[in-house]
Amino acid sequence: MSLNIYGTQLDSRLLIGSALYPSPQVMKQAILASGSKVVTLSLKRQNPNEQSGQQIWTYIQDIISETNGYLLPNTAGCKTAKEAVTLAKMSREIFQTDWIKLEVIGDDYNLQPDPIELLQATEQLITDGFKVLPYCTDDLVLCQRLYDLGCEVIMPWASPIGTGKGLMNPYNLETIRLRLPDATLILDAGIGKPSDACLAMEMGYDGVLLNSAVALADNPTLMAKAFAQALQAGEQGYVAGIMQQRQTAHPSTPTLDTPFWHQN
Amino acid sequence: MNIAIVGAGLMGRLLALSLLRKQQSDPVTITLFDKDTKQAHNSAAYAAAGLLTPLGESLHCEPNIVEMGFKSLALWPTILDSLQEHTIFQQTGAIMVSHEQDKGDYQRFVRHLKNNYPDDPVQTLDRAGLTALEPEIGRSFNQGLYLPEEGQVGNRRLLIALRKQLELENENENDTDSELNKTGKITSNKLQWLSACTVVDIEVSIKLSTVKYLHNNEEQSRQFDLVIDCRGTGASLKNSRVASTSNSSSTDSSNKDCAPLTDLRSVRGELFQLFAPDVNISRPIRLMHPRYQLYIAPKGNGYYVVGATEIESDDMSPMTVRSAMELLSAAYSVHPGFAEANIRQHVSQCRPAFSDNQPKIIVQDSLIQVNGLYRHGYLIAPVVLEQSLAVITNFLNNTNNALPHNDLLPVTVTGREEQAQLAKVSKEEPEHEHSY
């Protein structure tokens, strides 16, 4: 059972961010403990024109080499399609990857993605040969449009970035899963607890992307392990087939002391 | 005994002064190399706020840094009292506040202190308590934390005071009639300070190390019994070249034996110096922020330092608009009086950090490297100084005395000769816990 990112099969369904850890070394320990094969990386604030973040990029690339994993540069901090496209191109040049986590923020307070700019940027980047992993809100029509543009992977939010509020609207998320059965769906942003990740996997999501939930834990390495296990539990639960809920109790063995006309 | 100190930032100056004062039967001649001028405007120590706030830092560092911070708080007054020039030292506590939106981070910090530092004095403040301590910020916040043992030091003044002290004591050493020498000192140590002088190479060997440097655009070289490297980010792989001849099988100048600082990186920080005579804040204020550890440090006479961003980058270009907006809006949100403040200076600089964000003392034959103080330079400098001096004393006297802070700051030995000696001591070090 593997995660399919544009034809690349990965044996972990967890994608992990590289920000906010107490130190690069703790980040490395946490990433290794998570078993994740995809590490996201933001370069917006590191003066990419001058490649001023080279030291930390190399550090992250070394971790990825160790795990035989993949780097997923993101466009965090971009607010327009144009800005995001420029940064995506720069990322492709620096990191030699056509994968891009496309993030175009429309609101500063809750860092909510801007659907209009996101669609524009997606269209442009797909034309330019990128494999786009768009970060979007849990809006079915938006996800459908992204899929129609050629996004094989779509990443709706659980709740706003860094809030740890978990799955705010399970109905929307389930609907997207049901309506886009062939898309690779990764739940991105807002995950707080391992049980949030488990819930997403039980819904049939293909993967989970998170950062703060691990980086800001008291013990990031242990939390990374907890998430790895939660994802596995959720995935196995989904594959095993979760029983139907019932309105009334149904004893698994007949209650012999109850007259038959009283049994159901 | 000829000793070179490379880098005249905070650690370089503190070490130079301690060695100049060192009583040895064999006089010590110190050469202090620095690519900067004596003003040190390009040092990380200049672009700092001099906060001595161990608990305030504790959420983002390991417990040994916090302990070094508390120990250093107790050591600073003695260091400062030994200088002729006055440097501000304040230990009247610091206040931690948070805006409603960052309450989650604030609660995390409160929980962290409760779980990890239950015995350290922390007071929860309501609006009245906050107003009683800092009348002018009480109106902006409903609650805060008072960390009564935290403090700050006048970082820029200290760099000047150290420079003057080095010059003064060096003059006195050379003047046989001086008061200092009449007090019974048995040695006559000397200091030569080569500023605006870039070290381009350090060749390390067991007995003597060679420092190659550019002076007046000419490459020159000198041999030393001991080289102490305090270059900060200047010692990173990108910025330096350290060659080794101790491994006779290789003449390659990029020999891996002498590249223990490949792990050193730069972390960009930006801060403002503001002049705000309308603002009256008497102690450092720390403000919760999802990405940075923001602070406002009152420096007296209406001056405030507002910092600092933390960006994984070696970019030394001027402050970005985004950083400026984040820092200034933070200051304004704490006290509206900052709206009319003058921006006296905006500073960008890089902090030297290893991948575990821990300071390190690395001994390789006749080279001792002190680096990676990251955002904790002033916070932990006195402890790093004591530990470094103990390592240096062992080297000079060929002894193996126990080091004073091995539990907090273990020494890494990579050379061959000292390895056998110091490894014994290092072996006993307990691992510090990785708990946040």
Image: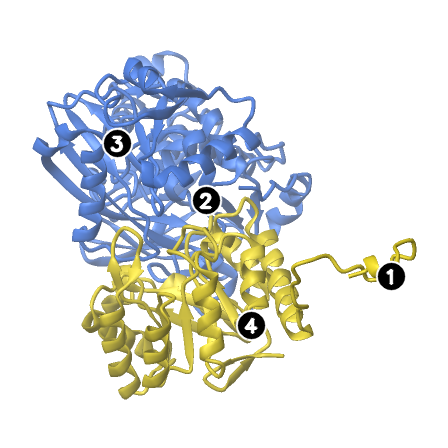
Task: Single out the mark in the foreground, 1 or 2.
Answer: 1
Q: Chain of mark 2?
A: B
Where residue B30 appears, as percent x and y from the top left, is: 36, 37
Which label belongs to residue A204?
4
Residue B296 in sight in this render:
yes
Chain containing the residue with disc 4: A
Rounded to the nearest angstrom, the CA distance separating label 3 from label 2 is 40 Å
N-terminal of the pair, mark 4 or mark 1, is: 4
Q: Give the CA separation, mark 1 to mark 2.
A: 95 Å
Horizontal and vertical percent position of residue B264: 42, 55
Of the two numbered discs 4 and 3 in the rendering, the one whose residue sits closer to the viewer? 4
Instruction: Name the residue rendered at 13%, 39% in the picture.
Output: B345
Q: Are marks 4 and 1 on the same chain?
A: yes
Q: Residue B296 — which label?
A: 3
Q: Report the mark closest to the observer, 4 or 1.
A: 1
Discs 4 and 3 carry the same chain letter: no
Going by the numbered disc 3, the residue's amino acid type is Ile
Report the residue marked by disc 2.
B226
Q: Callout 1 environment at 10 Å: few (<14), some (14 to 19), or many (20+)?
A: few
* Label 3: element kind: strand
Chain B colour is blue
For badge 1, the amino acid type reads Phe
**Mark 1–mark 3 contact, CB under 8 Å?**
no
Q: How is the image coloured?
A: by chain
Q: Which mark is residue A260?
A: 1
Q: Residue at x 69, y 58 (%)?
A: A248
